Amino acid sequence: MATRRIISEEKTLLEKDDRIGSSPAANEKSNITPAVPTSVIIKLLAFTFAMIVIPIGSYFATVDNLFSGNSTYAGALAAIMANVVLIGYIFVAMAEDQSDQQEQQEGRARSRDGKKVR
């Protein structure tokens, strides 16, 4: 024997307040902050732009002016400039990582001293 459902008492899909998967409930605000800070993205874009412009620019600037048409020397200089940009990016990334670690250590030291931490 089949039973009859009372439809007026059931909640619709939009009225349900439970979580389905990772989606937030209707009354909760979703977290839309980026996973990577904006400063990191800007640095990456700047070094990407530099990695394209500096080697190509140095090649065309020096092939006729400095090396009198010798494209081998101009190409070697472009390769060296690409490596300079890459090493610069590594130094900036290491400095940023060390500053993050220092901030965390200072925060731990403040919390151990009993001072008020933000």
Image (cartoon, rainbow, N blue to C red):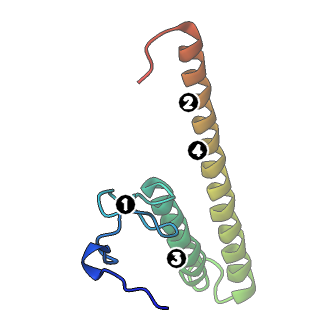
- In the image, residue 37 sits, relative to residue 16, either above or below, namely above
Q: Secondary structure at mark 4?
A: helix
State the residue at coordinates (59%, 12%): 112
- Depth-wise, is mark 1 or mark 4 nearer the camera? 1
Disc on res. 103:
2
Lower sequence index among marks 4 and 3: 3
Three-letter amino acid code at the position of disc 3: Val
Lower sequence index among marks 2 and 3: 3
In the rendered image, the quadrant that contains the C terminus is top left
Q: Secondary structure at mark 1?
A: loop
State the residue at coordinates (55%, 71%): 48
Q: CA distance from mark 1 to mark 2?
A: 28 Å
Residue on which disc 4 sits: 96
Image coordinates of residue 115 in percent, x first then y, are 47, 10
Disc on res. 30:
1
Q: CA distance from mark 4 to mark 3?
A: 24 Å
Side of 81 relative to 52 (left or right)? right
Q: CA distance from mark 1 to mark 4?
A: 29 Å
User: Where on the picture, by quarter, is residue 52?
Assistant: bottom right
Mark 4 closeness class: few <14, some 14–19, many ≥20 residues within 10 Å: few
Disc on res. 53:
3
Three-letter amino acid code at the position of disc 2: Glu
Lower sequence index among marks 4 and 2: 4
